[in-house]
Amino acid sequence: MKRLLINGIGGQMGHALVNAIADSAGEFEIACGVDPFCKTEFPFPIYASAFDVKEPIDVVIDFSVPKATEEILAYCVDRHIPAVICTTALSDELIARISEASREIPIFRSGNMSLGINLMRVLLKQARQTLGDAFDIEIVETHHNRKKDAPSGTALMLADAIREADGIAHPYVYGRSEKDRRRAPGEIGFHSIRGGTIVGQHEVRFLGQDEEISIRHEAYSKRVFAVGALRAAQYLTTKENGLYSMEDLVSELLN
């Protein structure tokens, strides 16, 4: 049984992880949580700082905010503990630090822990390689009315997959209001919708001459992200030092 530390235990994803672990048939147990603002009572210790943790930990799952990710990364390197980093909106500097830390510990990082979204990344690469540049690409993402960042980290991750397929840094265009110009060849457009309680919808539209192909994913609950994070944690405990992603996990499943 793997002993987990959940960073950001007081948030929505922290609660989703607790529920998913309760259904995981004894694969995992929560050793403790870290969250200086947690108001929920749990049957395990909650610490304000990772460096206060006393329990032995096999792997850390981080669903928090960038500032908290910085501390948990330092803790994991100091204690040589594998880390699954699920926090989004990370700065380029912090992403570089995560990459550097992966030389010392195994790290799994993804902007979206859904297996379906990461299969979508693979399909997008195949679609782009097949369709070429004859099709314009627009991404539409929809989330609940409390989400702050736009476009979503997942939408950016999907666009990055298309860039990787081409080996070209296609320009990203965020919305089209007040631009007063025609669409430029090669650009990838983003459109963000916020409302209600929608967990997450992502659609990538390939718009060609007289035809369209759309690849779409919808999450109906946050449980899919919690289950994906647990799958990543299990995967990571078998790996050497290095930086891993959901694409690595999906590739192993497909092979």
Image (tube, grey):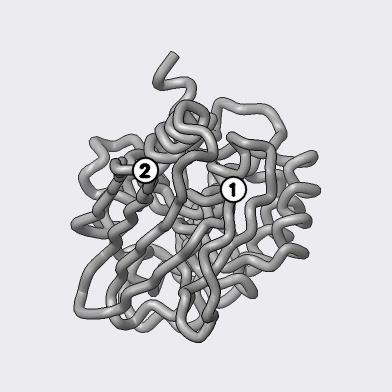
Q: As drawn, is 41 to the left or to the right of 183?
A: left
> In this rendering, is residue 139 above or below 234?
below
The residue that disc 2 covers is 209
Q: CA distance from mark 1 to mark 2?
A: 46 Å
Helix, strand or loop at label 1? It is strand
Q: Which mark is residue 120?
A: none
* Residue 98 rendering spot, x and y as whole percentages: 72, 53
| 70 left or right, relative to 111 | right
Classify 10 Å Cα crowding around label 2: few (below 14), some (14-19), many (20 and above).
Answer: few
**Relative to residue 18, is residue 71 depicted above or below?**
below
Viewer-nearest residue: 60 or 228? 228
> For numbered disc 2, what is the local secondary structure?
loop
Q: Is residue 146 above or below residue 58?
A: below
| Residue at 62% in and 36% down | 166
Percent of width and height locating residue 205:
36, 50
Q: Quadrant of residue 179?
A: bottom right
Q: Residue at x 64, y 52 (%)?
A: 170
Measuring from the top left, give residue 1's x and y in whole percent.
40, 35
